[in-house]
Image (tube, rainbow, N blue to C red):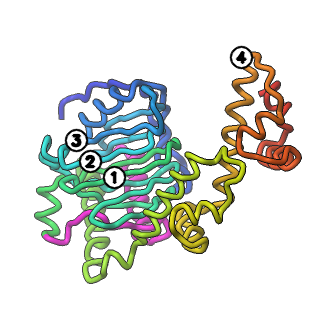
Amino acid sequence: MSPVPQLLHLKRISCCRNLSDMLTRISATHVPIDQFEAELQHICGMFSGHPAEARHNTRAVVALAEHSAIEMAHIASDLQMISRTRRDIRLDDGENFFLIVQEEGRALMSQNDVARMLQPGDMILIDSAQLSEFTFFGKFQRQVSLHLPRVEMNMRFGSQARGGLFLSHADHTARALAAIVAKAFHTSASEQQSLYLREALFGLIGTMLYERSDQNIEIDSDVSGAQSLRNGLAYVDRHFSDNTLNIQKIADDLGVSIRQLQRSFALLGVTPSDYLLQKRLEYACHLLRARRSNDEALLVSTIAYSSGFNDVSYFNRQFRRAFGCAPGQYGIEN
């Protein structure tokens, strides 16, 4: 394999000591989005990156590595979404399946009418010949992508090889796969050892495929819930500063019941109220930092109201609970 040009700054990749941590630790830096896309496309094929707002830079890193004859891509960014469209598929031949291991953050992954929320440690098998979409909600996240050659996958598994299959981090097969990948990272293996590790990897992937061969994929997913989550997050992101906004209004405007809204946000591990509060506090921190750096004379009460709070005492209590200090202290000392 010819060396891959390093377009993005990458510090030395090191391994974690146990599987409860990330498999790797890589350092990201702020780079132009088109530069990140170019490296991603060089390593993984045609994918498009979409920022959460109109901006030109992203905190990101992309790197290619090979361990025990297993090719792996390390991908991290704070983009809103990475997608593979019909146009992207036409521009390259989709020569790989990707086994995606979520390491940090959460990602909503969609392929073949399956939408799954990936938590750290979860895995999903993606077919690069099919449309796919990763939604990250503008939060920093990182993944390891194992590149599995299509020719070999078809030779080994035939029609059983398909995208959209999901493994929870608690699944025994997922744990075994993570152990194999961790072993590959840690081991300076001989050619023979590498062969056995690679065979163990494909053996577990076969277990994953055939275990689900007679199952209805849609039973294993909550497509409507995931789509409702996406709509709910986008709505709150746009309207959180409205101090009349509450959960009933969000549900009414989205045309769902409060119970449906709560179930969809449960995929993310939060309630709608928690997410709304989080967005308001994040924006308050942004205004407090701007006040500090620009020497602005914004009052804490003005910041509270601008962030969607209609009670300054409540804002102070929630801010102190979240950050361990009063809003005024945050603006001055952090």
Q: Which mark sits nearer the N-terminus, 1 or 2? A: 2
CA separation in Å, label 3 and label 4: 42 Å
Number of numbered discs: 4
Q: Residue at x 71, y 17 (%)?
A: 294
Indicate which disc residue 294 carries. Answer: 4
Locate residue 7, reporting x and y percent. 33, 24
As helix, strand or loop, the secondary structure at mark 1 comes to strand
As helix, strand or loop, the secondary structure at mark 2 comes to strand
Indicate which disc residue 84 carries. Answer: 2
Q: Which mark sits nearer the N-terminus, 1 or 4? A: 1
CA separation in Å, label 1 and label 2: 6 Å
Name of the residue lying farthest toward the right: 313
Q: Which mark sits nearer the N-terminus, 3 or 4? A: 3
In the displayed structure, 24 sits above or below 128; it is above
* Image marks 1 and 4: residues in contact by CB distance under 8 Å: no
Q: Amino acid at mark 2?
A: Arg
Report the side of 326 relative to 99 (left or right).
right
Position of the N terminus, as image quadrant, is top left
Locate residue 13, reporting x and y percent. 44, 35
- 68 and 145: which is toward the camera: 145
* Image marks 3 and 1: residues in contact by CB distance under 8 Å: no
For residue 326, what is the image quadrant?
top right
Q: Residue at x 76, y 46 (%)?
A: 309
